[in-house]
Each structure stands twice: as structure tokens, then as C-alpha cells.
Image (cartoon, grey):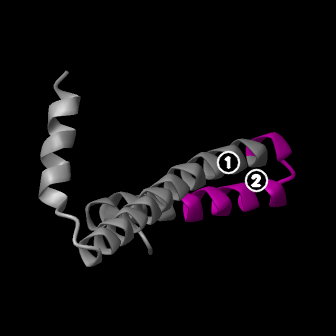
Amino acid sequence: MNVLPGDMQRAAQLLDCCDYCLARARVAQFGRDLDEAEKWVKEFLRCKRDLDELVRRKEEHDKLLQVVEMMKERGVDIAIIMRGAGRDENR
């Protein structure tokens, strides 16, 4: 799964939640309880949204790494930029 290492456990839990919700929705559908099935589908979508957010964070992180590498290749000292950004945050 393409998530940050620190998000791996949460991503695995969300994936398990997705599996469980779909299984429960299917059981409810077989039992002709469409309201119950809908409840589980909504819960699946919530878990999926949270999982998508973890994937989005990893993609954003990867893009930032690419920018940093490009700046290093062009001779930009990242440490100076980081010190400057730290001062801006303290204002």
C-alpha cells in the first residue's frame, strides 16, 4: 500500500474495515435488508475516504521530496530555506 511508513498500521486497519463493511453489506443484501446494507456501504465509504487521505498524504510527501531533490541539483541550500521558514512560522 502506498502510504507513509508511519501510516501503515492505520492503513491496514482501514483496509480491514473496508473488507468487513462490504462483507456485512453483502450479508444484509442477501437478507433483503437494504437499509442495513446501505448503512454498511456508507461506513465502507467513510473508511475508504480515510484510506484515500493517507494515500494522498504519501503522494504529497513524494512530490515534496522531488522538489527538494530538484533544488539540491540546482545548488539550492535547503537548510537556509528551512531556517527561514521556521522564522516565518514563529511570527
**Marks 1 & 2, CB-CB < 8 Å contact:** yes
The span picked out in magenta is 18-36
> Residue 71's spot in the image, x, y percent?
30, 68
Assess disc 2: are there few (<14), some (14-19) or many (≥20) residues with their C-alpha within 10 Å of its C-alpha: some
Q: Which residue is mark 2?
A: 28
Residue 13 located within the stretch drawn in magenta = no
Q: CA separation, marks 1 and 2? A: 9 Å
User: Residue at position x 58%, y 55% from top?
Assistant: 48
Taking depth in this image into account, of 73 and 27 the one nearest to the observer is: 73
Secondary structure type for disc 1: helix
User: Residue at position x 54%, y 57% from top?
Assistant: 52
Q: Judge whether 21 appears above or below 39 on screen.
A: below
Amino acid type, callout 2: Ala
Q: Judge whether 7 appears above or below 46 on screen.
A: below
Q: Judge from the rendering whether residue 1 lies leftward or rightward of residue 6; answer left or right.
A: right
Assess disc 1: are there few (<14), some (14-19) or many (≥20) residues with their C-alpha within 10 Å of its C-alpha: many
> Residue 55's spot in the image, x, y percent?
48, 62
